[in-house]
Image: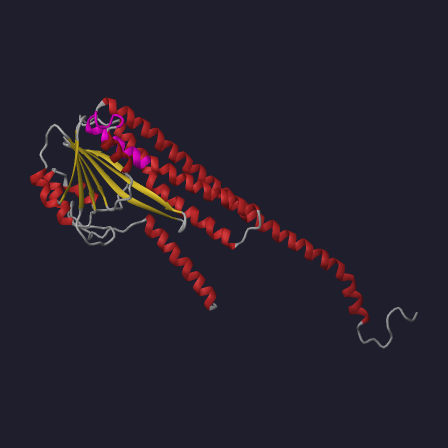
């Protein structure tokens, strides 16, 4: 085996290992560890946890920045609705203090700091917990990033936990600050709906990027396809698989919110969650359609390569057919005969 062949296979193996690692994540928690054992499984980082607090009612809004140590003293349940946005999950001790202040179940806290959770929604005695994925598509790297977001709806508060600030909730913040729409006039379950709706709506932007990539590859395949097109096609199919893994369970999670019996979610808000459910069903349908289109594009690529090979073989066959008689004549009369055939009878 040549060095070039070996290096190509090594690169392919590394890409396959990376793909498997993104789809199948091995937990860092030791086997046999007790339930609720806290091990941060995200990207290592330093610095304090950022906590942005909004207290609002129909006529006023007040914003503050807290630390984890300040939450037990500064949070007081009152008439104003409170949204606490926590950015940075790497500080396990800070997460424990926040969990104690809001009576968060240890298993929920374990899920919060483990970014490999499947999208889901769960009902507890004093809270409704929703775990979803914030998905981005990098057009330059042709890569999907999926960050976990946990939303907890409690009595008088909404908590949102995320590892980094992607600007996802900027629209909700603006609506709260400007008093537009119903968000400041309704109860906190409507705020939870607005956050979930932001996450799901962003999926359509990612699908739009996938659609543009698919159209470009279809055009490339119908032209003169080469190995670069095949590599790009494989890359997009791989990232679509990552996107599907992140978004497919969201349908079940939002559907559970529509059927939720918790007193924290009012019947009027369930109607809005049903609208989000319709959106995520569309996302799933479009994802499956793109998978089919990419599979068809792959078949088209292979057919195009096969047709080009057949065309080459046809030309070579014609050339060979023309030269066979000449080769025969040259072979016969080029031999060292004492008496040349057919010259003497």
Identify the residue at image location x=52%, y=44%. Answer: 218
Q: From this view, report whether residue 271 is shown above or below residue 295.
A: above
Identify the residue at image location x=81%, y=76%. Answer: 336
Q: Position of residue 193 (x, y in %)?
A: 26, 30
Identify the residue at image location x=41%, y=34%. Answer: 285
The rendered magenta stretch, by its main secondary structure, is classed as helix
Q: Decide whether residue 183 is among the magenta residues.
A: yes
Q: Position of residue 14 (x, y in %)?
A: 38, 58
Q: Residue furthest right?
A: 345
In this image, 196 relative to 319: left or right? left
User: In which quarter of the view is residue 173 placed?
Assistant: top left
Q: Where, quadrant-wise, is the C terminus in this rendering?
A: bottom right
User: In which quarter of the view is residue 289 placed?
Assistant: top left
User: In which quarter of the view is residue 266 placed?
Assistant: top left
Q: From this view, report whether residue 131 is shown above or below residue 345.
A: above
Q: Decide whether residue 331 is among the magenta residues.
A: no
Q: From this view, report whether residue 86 is shown above or below residue 177.
A: below
Q: Residue furthest top?
A: 268
Q: Nearer the viewer, residue 185 or 308?
A: 185
In this image, 169 relative to 215: left or right? left
Which residues make up the magenta segment? 180-200
Q: Position of residue 76 (x, y in %)?
A: 9, 34
Q: Nearer the viewer, residue 268 or 79?
A: 79
């Amino acid at each position: 085996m040549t060095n070039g062949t070996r290096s190509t296979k090594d690169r392919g193996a590394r890409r396959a290992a990376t793909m498997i690692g993104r789809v199948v994540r091995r937990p860092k928690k030791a086997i046999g560890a007790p339930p609720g054992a806290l091990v941060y499984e995200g990207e290592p980082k330093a610095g304090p946890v950022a906590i942005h607090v909004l207290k609002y009612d129909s006529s006023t809004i007040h914003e503050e920045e807290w630390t984890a140590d300040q939450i037990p003293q500064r949070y007081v349940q009152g008439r104003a609705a409170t949204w606490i946005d926590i950015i940075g999950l790497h500080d396990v001790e800070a997460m424990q203090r926040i969990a104690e202040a809001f009576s968060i179940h240890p298993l929920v806290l374990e899920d919060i700091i483990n970014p490999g959770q499947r999208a889901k929604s769960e009902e507890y005695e004093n809270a409704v917990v929703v775990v979803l994925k914030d998905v981005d598509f990098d057009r330059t790297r042709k890569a999907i990033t999926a960050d976990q977001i946990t939303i907890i709806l409690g009595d008088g508060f909404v908590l949102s936990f995320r590892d980094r600030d992607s600007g996802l909730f900027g629209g909700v913040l603006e609506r709260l600050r400007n008093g537009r729409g119903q968000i400041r006039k309704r109860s906190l379950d409507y705020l939870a709906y607005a956050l979930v709706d932001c996450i799901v709506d962003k999926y359509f932007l990612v699908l739009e990027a996938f659609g543009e990539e698919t159209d470009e590859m279809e055009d490339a395949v119908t032209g003169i396809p080469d190995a670069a097109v095949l590599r790009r096609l494989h890359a997009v199919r791989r990232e679509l698989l990552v996107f599907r893994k992140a978004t497919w369970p969201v349908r079940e999670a939002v559907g559970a919110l529509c059927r939720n019996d918790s007193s924290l979610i009012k019947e009027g808000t369930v109607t809005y969650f049903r609208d989000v459910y319709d959106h995520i069903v569309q996302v799933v349908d479009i994802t499956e359609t793109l998978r089919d289109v990419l599979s068809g594009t792959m078949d088209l690529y292979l057919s195009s390569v096969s047709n080009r090979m057949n065309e080459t073989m046809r030309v070579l066959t014609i050339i060979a057919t023309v030269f066979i008689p000449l080769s025969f004549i040259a072979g016969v009369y080029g031999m060292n005969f004492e008496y040349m055939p057919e010259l003497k009878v």
